[in-house]
Image (cartoon, grey):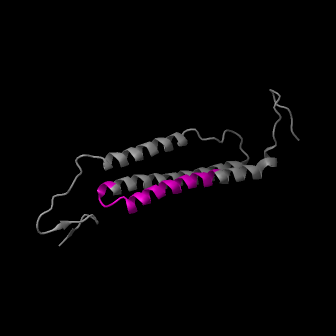
Amino acid sequence: MSQKQSGGAPAVDFKLIRPKNYFANERTFISWLQLAVTMGGLGLALLNFGGDGIRVRISAFVFETGALGLIVYAYTMFWHRAERLRRGERGTWDDRFIPIVVVIFFIFATAVNFGLTFHKKAYTPPLDNLSVVTMSWGSKAR
C-alpha cells in the first residue's frame, strides 16, 4: 500500500485521502468567501453610514471592488484545485502570493478612506442660484 521513498518518508496513496482533500478545498473556499463578505460589509457600512458625498462613495467602491475580486479569485481557485484533485495530481497546494496582495489591498483601501476623509480641501461643486447639483448620475435637479 505505501512504499518508502528516498529520505525515509512513506509514500501516501493519494486515493485514500481524497475526501479529506476535497473538504480542505471547500474550507479554503469558504474562508476566502468569509473575508470577501467582511470586506463587502465594510464597503456597505461606509456607503450607508458614512454620510453623503463622493468621498464616501469612492471609498465604498474600493472596498466593494476588492470584495468582488476576492470572490472571483476564490471561485476560480476552488474549481482549479477541485479539477486537480479529480485528476489526482500531486504538487504544492499553497498560495503564497494572493494573501500578500489582499493585505496590501486592505492597506491601500484604508489609506484611500483616510485620505479622502481627512483631506483638507474637500471638493465642493460650484452651485448657481438656479440649480442644485445632485450626486445621482451627475444630473441637475431644477
Left or right, 135 with reference to 73:
left
Q: Residue furthest right?
A: 1
Residue 92 occupies quadrant? top right
Total label count?
0
On screen, residue 139 above or below 118: below
Q: Position of residue 58 (x, y in %)?
A: 34, 54
Q: Determine whether, in the image, residue 14 is placed left or right of residue 57.
A: right
Residue beneath the point at 82% across and 48% down: 16
Where 97 sits versus 79, above or below? Answer: above
> What residue is drawn where x is 82% and y is 36%?
11
Of all residues, the one furthest to the left in this rendering is 129
**89 within the magenta span:** no
Q: Position of residue 117 (x, y in %)?
A: 32, 50
Magenta stretch contains residue 51? yes
Q: Main secondary structure of the magenta part?
A: helix
- Range of residues picked out in magenta: 28-55
* Left or right of residue 97, residue 106 in this image: left
Residue furthest out toward the top: 7
Residue 117 in the image: above or below residue 101: below
Query: For this rendering, which residue is in front, 129 or 18?
Result: 129
Q: 21 or 141: which is nearer to us?
A: 141
- What residue is drawn where x is 41% and y is 43%? 108
Residue 139 in picture, x, y percent from top left = 23, 67
| Image position of 20 (left or right of 76) | right
Q: Position of residue 57 (x, y in %)?
A: 34, 57
In the foreground, 81 or 100: 100
